[in-house]
Image (cartoon, rainbow, N blue to C red):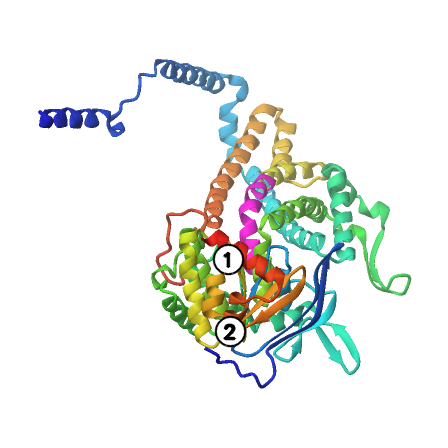
Amino acid sequence: MSSAVQLADDRQATLRDVANAHRPPELGRWLLWAFVLAVAANFAWIVAWNPNFGWPVVAQWFTAESILRGLYVTLGLTVVAMVIGVVIGLLLAIARLSDDRLFSGLAGLFIWFFRGTPLLVQLIFWYNLSTLFPEISISIPFGPTLVSWHTNDLITPMTAAIAGLSLNEAAYMAEIIRGGLLSVDKGQTEASDAFGMTRARALWRVIIPQAMRSIVPPTGNQLISMIKATSLVSVIAMADLLYSVQAVYNRTFEVIPMLMVAVIWYLVITTVLNIGQGFIERYYARGERGATERAPVIAEATP
Amino acid sequence: MSRIASEGAPLVSARNVHKSFGHNEVLKGIDLDVMPGEVVVVLGPSGSGKSTFLRCINHLEAIDRGSIMVAGEQIGYRLNGERLTKLSPRAIAAQRRQIGMVFQQFNLFPHMTALENIIEAPVGVHGHSRKNATDYAMELLGRIGLTEKANAYPRQLSGGQQQRVAIARALAIRPKLMLFDEPTSALDPELVGEVLSTMRDLAGQGLTMIVVTHEIGFAREAADRVVFMDGGLVVEQGRPEEVLANPSHPRTRLFLSRFIREAA
């Protein structure tokens, strides 16, 4: 008798084991999927067969030499401006957080000015710097001049673009990095101090690696805006991707196809960057996830 | 269990130490000497200033009045003839290198493995070779029974294991003095024992230790001297069997009675 009860009980337990559960039929979800896919396919069809997009023209110009040259300028400008922006931004963030009123005040002033004025205006100002200061010289304040240059020799579209983009970027990066540094637990600074680390070493070895977790995502954002912000330099006659595209459609009047060339390139770059950002985020998340223990004793962690 | 030489110069010597946070005076004139090899346990109710005093010893907090000497050097200052000048952050960092500290919240570096945590200061601050530092770190990990956790990140360790790694990290710089700031207060009750037993081992090895804690049992077994603080002052001190069994000050008596009632 009891064995029969036992048997029924076991059967119940097997039947009720959630590992064997089935999903309920989800007809609504299937219909929704079908609808969305149909709309997407239809949209793709319309775009693909609309002659106004001029896909043959897009294909013809996509890897044209002048376009690729513009692409290199855009990429180069982005990388250079971003690197300079991050370096200056890091110094600004450290200065802003320092107890020294002078440093924190100067950093605050810089950030206030460069975040507070439009990038386009800053670029035009840099480009036209010679109208404000015809000569740039290094001298002792109110004293004799040591070296002097004509501003027009220094400020080319290239230097104006780099100066404008990187200083503007530095102001934003300073705030992102400052936020990241502040997000690190105060105990970490105390432990570094207690071990007799210098401030620089504590930042480099302990604080910044932990701050990276909250610095990387907004920096990825900044990098993507930077790629698109470089298109502003076309106003100061810098031959970036957008400028190269414009140069073509000003001749051929194929405005939309040529803009599609630029749009697709911008999308390709940002896609690549998004993937890279994912890797970097995973690297700085080490020590956060519970399961992964590192195998080699003192090898570098793989991203 | 008296292994203290009552002769000779103290390793730590605090004189008339005052410290305020805003209008709140936390330390109101602390005098304390700690002899080399001595284990001093500082007891006292929350807010008595015992943690603050500990943090003044390695200048994590700057004191407002008085002086603290460690191993013959004044912490944070230098006396040039008759003129006392503040030390630079770099010089203060150098002074801290002979003092190990263990924190209530462990403060392990979460982006480094246990082993990397332990060798960080020996390699990066003391300039030891990576090889030597790693060998010594593995020896320390062996002593606390965590050899197999060398490559684990702090997040993967229990609280007790983290605190033992933090102790090994502090020992790795071969400190003259060890400061323990409530090392078991953040631990689950069942994990307190392993940390206390590690600390008892250290106490038995002649390391100079100042331990701020609520663990009366540890004070009784491991301390050479118990210092009872209340209201920013040292109200009573002496051998643990005397102070804990026959407290002479009413504040000490009140604190201990409350504690014993809680423990019972």
- Relative depth, front residue between B216 and A195: B216
The residue positioned 34% from the left and 13% from the top of the image is A27
Q: Nearer the viewer, residue B149 or A225?
A: B149
Residue A150 in magenta stretch: no
How packed mark 2 is, by other alpha carbons closer than 10 Å (few <14, some 14-19, many 20 or more), is many
Mark 2 — residue? B224
Q: Residue furthest right?
A: A142
Q: Amino acid at mark 1?
A: Phe
Q: Which circle marks residue A114 in the picture?
A: none
Taking depth in this image into account, of A19 and B23 the one nearest to the observer is B23
x then y, percent, for residue A202:
59, 61
Residue located beneath label 1 in the image: B106
Left or right: A178 in relation to A24? right
Label 2: which secondary element: loop
Mark 1 and mark 2: Cα distance apart in space: 25 Å
| Residue range of the region highlighted in magenta in the rendering | A204-222
Q: x and y percent of residue B233 in the render?
A: 67, 64
Q: Main secondary structure of the magenta part?
A: helix
Q: Are marks 1 and 2 in contact (CB under 8 Å)?
A: no
Query: Which residue: 74% across, 51% down?
Result: A107
Give the number of the mark in front: 1 or 2: 2
- Residue B117 shows in the view: no
Q: Quadrant of the N terminus of chain A?
A: top left
The question of residue A207 being in magenta is answered with yes
